[in-house]
Amino acid sequence: MTVKITPLNVNTHETWTPARIAYLRRRWPHDSATQIGKALGLPGRDHGKNAVIGKVHRLGLAPKARSPRRSIAHKQARSRAV
């Protein structure tokens, strides 16, 4: 079944329709929050990303695992800052 995702009409309050939630659930394991926000036509890079992340938390979807490389770099940066 293919769900047509239409761009967001900013003059209405239909940001999270059932079709958009289904799309988010399907794409969350595979795409970044920014990519999903763009695909849904959410306004702005950061606003779309934050809207997606907020909805993911409210839906209780599993958080994405951080890559080991990023975690190591983050720890090294924190140890240098102290």
Image (cartoon, rainbow, N blue to C red):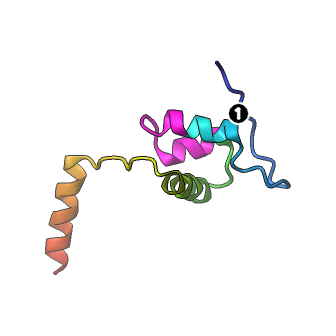
Q: Which residue lies furthest to the bottom in this view?
A: 82
Q: Which residue lies furthest to the front in this view?
A: 60
Q: Is residue 58 above or below residue 5?
A: below
Measuring 72% from the left and 50% from the top, which residue is drawn there?
Answer: 15
Q: Is the magenta stretch mostly helix, strand or loop?
A: helix
Residue 53 is situated, as x and y percent measured from the top left of the image, at: 51, 55
Residue 79 is situated, as x and y percent measured from the top left of the image, at: 14, 73
Q: Is residue 72 above or below residue 2?
A: below
Residue 25 is situated, as x and y percent measured from the top left of the image, at: 53, 38
Measuring 24% from the left and 53% from the top, which residue is drawn there?
Answer: 70
Measuring 50% from the left and 35% from the top, which residue is drawn there?
Answer: 27
Question: Looking at the rendering, in which quadrant would you find the C terminus?
Answer: bottom left
Q: What stretch is highlighted in magenta?
A: 25-39
Drawn side of residue 27 relative to residue 11, left or right: left
Q: Which amino acid does label 1 sit on?
A: Ile
The answer to which image quadrant residue 11 occupies is: bottom right
Q: Name the residue tied to disc 1.
A: 5
